[in-house]
Amino acid sequence: MELKTIATPHVPVRYFECGTGRPLLFLHGAGGLTAEDPFLNALAAKHRVLAPLLPGYGDSQECAQLRDMLDITLHTLDVVDALGLDDPLLVGHSMGGMIAAEMAALDNHRFSRLALIAPAGLWLDDHPIPDIFSLVPYEYPPLLFHDVESGAKLMTAGTAFDNPEWLKGFLIANARQLGMAGKILFPIPERGLAQRLYRVRARTLLVWGDGDRLIPPAYAQAFKKAIAGAELVSIPEAGHMAIWEKTSAVVTALERLD
């Protein structure tokens, strides 16, 4: 796994690259991305994986020019251009799925295959999405994981939520990251995507953990209804972070687009 930098019109972009094969562009969720991410490494077994960090994530530079959903969507399309990618498999998880869906709707001749893993971007009054901006660290695992105890260990790398060093690092990183994520997720993760999904022409796969408590499976049905021909794969005994809890099952599901 290599961490590289490319230039885009507004800001240098840091991105992870690993593996060989047909290119796959992965857009991360609000929790960010690291070189140790098991999902990226699993994808690299069959794909050349490119995973850009949004400004403000990891060691990447912040960017005040990215103000809203349109700015962030166009920025990520600039990243595709800068990477020289021709029709990559476009994969997004959670917030990254929201961005990927916007890209596929806005530039609907560029991508032929789209995978949305528990994407944000819609709002159902009967199924409100929890406010991630109001949570303290120990409140995340019950929302993100089917197996809460194991999920807590994954989040903290085996330490405890009250470990001072871990907590300090988490709070600093989370403040930077959520500052960026808040531009499209706060106060609710809805920026009109529902009115644009009809434009998506890519063959679309939806992947959802059947125990997702953050963005519940009712949203899977809403996305499926809105995107013509979309296919839905439900992952048993998995939460919002199915990409960590059931990595192999999610990777296998994505093979439907190969």
Image (cartoon, rainbow, N blue to C red):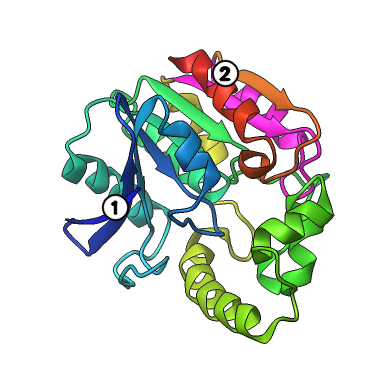
Residue at 60% over, 46% down: 120
User: What is the three-letter code of the residue carrying label 1?
Assistant: His
Q: Position of residue 180 (x, y in %)?
A: 46, 67
The answer to whether residue 234 is visible is yes
Relative placement, left or right, of 236 versus 20 is right
Q: Which residues are magenta?
A: 203-228
First in sequence, mark 2 or 1: give its number. Answer: 1
Q: Answer whether labels 2 and 1 touch (C-beta < 8 Å).
A: no
Residue at 53% over, 81% down: 172
Local SS, label 2: loop
The residue wearing badge 2 is: 230
The disc placed on residue 75 is: 1
Instruction: Say if 16 sits above or below 195 in the image.
Output: below
The disc placed on residue 34 is: none
Q: Position of residue 30 (x, y in %)?
A: 55, 58
Specify the farthest residue to the front: 158
User: Which quadrant would residue 233 be assigned to in this image?
Assistant: top right
| Relative depth, front residue between 187 and 251 | 251
Relative placement, left or right, of 249 versus 201 is right
Tell me the crowding category of disc 2: few under 14, some 14 to 19, or many 20 or more residues within 10 angstroms, Cα based.
some
Residue at 73% over, 60% down: 153
| Relative depth, front residue between 249 and 81 | 249
Q: Is residue 47 magenta?
A: no
| Relative depth, front residue between 258 and 47 | 47
